[in-house]
Image (spheres, rainbow, N blue to C red):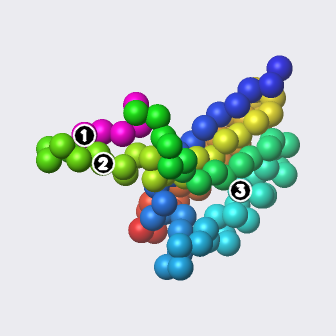
């Protein structure tokens, strides 16, 4: 049975000063995909995000912080997806500790 999981990541956690994805993040995702036997995709946010993902600010503008996040999509069998998701969340936790 195929399953998928999604992990959202704030851009400032994975981008370098030149707005490129840091190589150690990509290496970790590749290693995690190989180790767990899953397909993992790191996707940039969509400009046409659904209205549920945006919030209204006090000055009637739209806060687009939520639709600026990167999305890690993980596909595979149930156990492998959960394992890969856990490892991805651990990576985010390690990055947050360094920031």
Query: Where residue 29 sits in the image (x, y, percent)?
Result: 71, 56
Left or right, 81 with respect to 65, comes to: right
Instruction: Give the mark nearest the N terminus, 2 or 1.
Output: 1
Residue named by callout 2: 63
Q: Where on the picture, by quarter, is residue 21?
A: bottom right
Q: Residue furthest top?
A: 1
Q: Is residue 11 above or below residue 53?
A: below
Residue named by callout 1: 56
Q: Quick one: quadrant of the N terminus?
A: top right
- Total tally of numbered discs in the picture: 3
Q: Which span is picked out in magenta?
A: 52-56
Residue 55 is inside the magenta segment: yes
Instruction: Give the mark nearest the N terminus, 2 or 3.
Output: 3
Q: Residues within 10 Å of mark 3 (few under 14, many from 20)?
A: many
Q: Quick one: quadrant of the C terminus?
A: bottom left
Residue named by callout 3: 29
Q: Is residue 78 above or below residue 53?
A: above
């Amino acid at each position: 049975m195929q399953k998928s999981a999604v992990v959202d990541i704030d851009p400032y956690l994975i981008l370098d000063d030149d707005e490129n994805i840091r190589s150690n993040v990509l290496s970790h995702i590749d290693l995690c995909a190989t180790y767990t036997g899953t397909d993992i995709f790191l996707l940039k946010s969509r400009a046409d995000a659904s209205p549920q993902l945006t919030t209204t600010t006090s000055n009637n503008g739209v806060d687009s912080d939520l639709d600026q996040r990167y999305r890690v999509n993980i596909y595979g069998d149930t156990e492998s997806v959960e394992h890969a998701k856990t490892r991805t969340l651990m990576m985010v936790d390690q990055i947050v500790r360094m920031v």
